[in-house]
Amino acid sequence: MTGRVYLVGAGPGDPELLTLKGQRVLETADVVLFDHLANEELLRHVPPASERIYVGKKKADHALSQDEIARLMIACAEAGKIVVRLKGGDPFLFGRGGEEVEALVAAGIPFQVIPGVTVPVGLAAYTGVPLTHREHTSVVTFVTGHAPASIDWSNVSGSETIVIFMGLTTLADIAARLIEAGRNPQTPAMAVRWATRPTQQTIVAPLAEIAARVAEAGMKPPATIVIGDVVGLRERLDWFEHLPLFGRRVVVTRAADQAGALSKLLTQAGAEAIELPVISLEPTEDATALLRLSFYDWLVFTSVNGVRYFVEHMERLGVDIRRWPPRVAAIGPATAEAIARLHVKVDAIPESFVAEGLAAAFEQFEMTGRKVLVARAAEGRDVVPEALRQRGARVDVVDIYRNVVPPDAPGRAREVFAHKPDWVTFTSSSTVKNLLSMIDRPTLDGVRLASIGPATSETMRKHGLIVDAEAEPHTMEGLVRAMILRT
């Protein structure tokens, strides 16, 4: 049975600008053919077993020719596969989508086209330069700049706003032709590279000077040029490049299935989040202490992961999840929230979200003779158990999960640190130790380091690292806030 091809606009670069329909189609794909301009973060939506094929489309550096791409789409569809052709920007705006659809029609292949946020529209929003404005322009012209001699610039020059695709390498020629056709040499102009990404680069200058300024800055493709009075609004309307962490490259060392929350916060602050999971979590083999759960007066959790693996062990052991001890303690609000989702009341949350704070939270309770079970990581600190024993409690510790090093982490670390980042974030002592087992200590020279809290900071200092920022409160939000305050 013949499959189907979807031409999907990947948007201008920010992966969150993908349409909901585009995401839904990616989630069903058997094969994805993606361009250089399509953010590879979007491939996270693709099922793990699906095939991903890079088809290039850089200027003068095509992994596959246009004809080869068309033949590949057709062959995959004829094999009964769902094919997604993921294209930067919008397929039908200088994306050669029309040519690809014509090839599909000729071959009798069913297809759909899913539009994307075009690069000029995304660029306009993320540079503070509206392409239309009642007081400045009501006419916008889109033009391709790779062959200036083929364009009648006398027809283009009078347009109030001109957007030029693929014109960076011919910008001097284009500017000269526009001026010769009557455009004012002092018309505001700008060139924008990697629009909507944390790596966005913007150069603004009069039309007569823009090519020289681009050359001085060493700007390379891909870039888009905007010419017109609306460029003058950028100084007042720009917001993206004023985000507090704009352009900073920040390494996130959390486990792969947990890095997303911190990465999202960093991205919202304008940073480029680079995920380098140096720990992976897995359940321990023996958690039989949970079979006697009803024996205890207190159950203590020292992390969100503790709650997660507690539930997994309970299900594996066949223990009724409702058999909680009378009272439950959590090290912080995130852990308490995870417990609350299980419809269980939390009786103790410390003011300071660290082990010392959790131990102090028990001072309001009579603990002599109380039976306490602490569910934690195998590498957990003994601060809480020892403090409770000193108060007269009978304490048992059950290690319900452990941290291990992902097998691909050392290779990934070499890739990440090939270009020195601005920040590295550590969210546990294990992330510190594991990263330092993969890279030489001097690799972190000149890199600012951020810690989730005192215990992690202590580990960093023991290994000769400087703590440039420490979260307060000791949460992901507090970590990003601390980095902002020290940037």
Image (tube, rainbow, N blue to C red):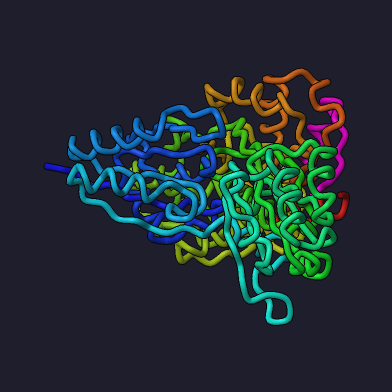
- The residue at the far bottom in this view is 134
Q: Is residue 234 above or below residue 452?
A: below
Where does the image place residue 358, in percent across and percent down from the top left? 71, 53
Report which quarter residue 205 is drawn in: bottom right
Q: Is residue 213 visible?
A: yes
In the image, is 186 to the left or to the right of 408? right
Q: Is residue 161 above or below residue 96?
A: below
In front: 375, or 199? 199
For the point 76% across and 62% down, the residue is 183
Q: Is residue 226 above or below residue 209?
A: below
Count of numbered tags: 0
Q: Is residue 196 above or below residue 283?
A: below
Q: Is residue 368 visible?
A: no
In front: 339, or 191? 191
Residue range (magenta): 454-472
Report which quarter residue 131 is drawn in: bottom right
Does the stretch in magenta take in 43? no
Where does the image place residue 136, in percent across and percent down from the top left? 73, 76
Q: Quadrant of the N terminus?
A: top left
Does the stretch in magenta take in 465? yes
Where does the image place residue 227, in percent across and percent down from the top left? 72, 60
In the image, is 367 to the left or to the right of 147? right
For the point 44% across and 32% down, the residue is 54
Where does the image place residue 188, in percent across and percent down from the top left? 80, 61
For the point 49% across and 35% down, the residue is 57
In front: 347, or 122? 122
For the point 69% across and 26% down, the residue is 435
- The residue at the far left in this view is 1
In the image, is 468 to the left or to the right of 431? right
